[in-house]
Image (cartoon, rainbow, N blue to C red):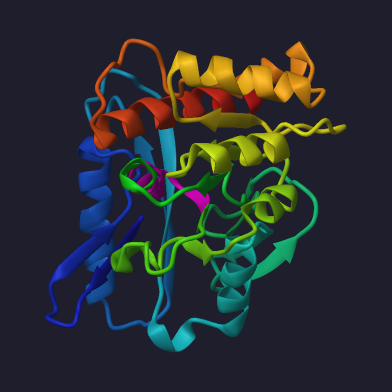
Amino acid sequence: MLLRFNLQQQWQQSDTIGGGHLEFQAIDIAKAMLKETETSVRRIERFNLSARLGQCCGGVMWLLFEKISPATVTSDLSVSLQAWRVGKRISRTVSHQYASTWQTMDMKQQPSFEFDSDSSEQWQFSQQIQPYAMQVLICGAGHVGEAIVRCLLPIGVRVKWIDPRDDIFPSDLLQQVHCITTDTLEAEIEHFDRSGAILILTHDHQLDLQLCFSALKPTAKPFAYVGMIGSKSKRAIFEKRMQVRGYTPETLQRLVCPIGIEGISSKQPAMIAIAVVAQLLQVFDVKK
């Protein structure tokens, strides 16, 4: 969670640690730290959730607070953030004595929190920040594609969005999503991470079929999810055409069509998006 002053010297908050009384107290502490004259301050605070906060769940939480001045934001943080955006793991180490340092990591590691045995005021904290848990390639920038993109963005998903039409992507999403105008959508599928999901939502049924050929091509590691917008009738027609091309029933079973969790019949793009994103979350939650 980040708390900061904006240019009008008003408080702004990004993200959350869960809300409730704990977050309110954390915000008060952060505000007090921002008002201090020191430019770089770090502290650890222990919260007894039952005795101190009156929360029924009980337990204890430790919160790490760090005041960051724009002048102290180092180049290693910028480099690490760029690496994280393209799927790299990054690590952060901070202590009572030194501000956070950042670097890229190749191996997974567990977070660590160490206290000096002689003084609780001496500590060191290390954590690893994983890349996006879910990667989605969306083929088609129509109303449903846009609704799905807008639904995915707040939950930390790495989205690549492709379409053969010029000037089809909404201008307000160009800086938030990797948008590509291309006539070779099949090539984008071929090179996409196999641990990710493919959504086929184009304006052209023949193009949808070609993309199904690419997304379901037999391979040692299939995509985690391949979904196509359409009815049961569309699926049946596509299955017949794909069987003629040698696709086995086992392979065709991996195609999700219609897409989205059951029980939502609305044809509104926003409703379809909610159903599809819920289905993706189910798939990737199982694979964690």
Residue at 64 percent across and 53 percent down: it is 116
**Relative to 262, is 251 on the left or the right?**
right
**Relative to 10, is 249 on the left or the right?**
right
**Relative to 26, is 177 on the left or the right?**
right
Residue at 69 percent across and 68 percent down: it is 103
**Relative to 225, is 150 on the left or the right?**
left
Examine the image and state in which quarter residue 93 appears.
bottom right
Examine the image and state in which quarter residue 95 appears.
bottom right
Examine the image and state in which quarter residue 276 appears.
top left
Between 288 and 171, the one lying in front of the other is: 171
Between 40 and 278, the one lying in front of the other is: 278
Is residue 52 in view?
no
Image position of 206 with respect to 256: above or below: below
Specify whether residue 283 is painted magenta.
Answer: no
The magenta region covers: 148-159
Residue 122 place in picture, x, y as percent? 57, 60
Q: Quadrant of the C terminus?
A: top right
Residue 283 place in picture, x, y as percent? 56, 24
Residue at 26 percent across and 29 percent down: it is 271
Residue 175 place in picture, x, y as percent? 40, 69
Q: Quadrant of the N terminus?
A: bottom left
Q: Main secondary structure of the magenta part?
A: helix
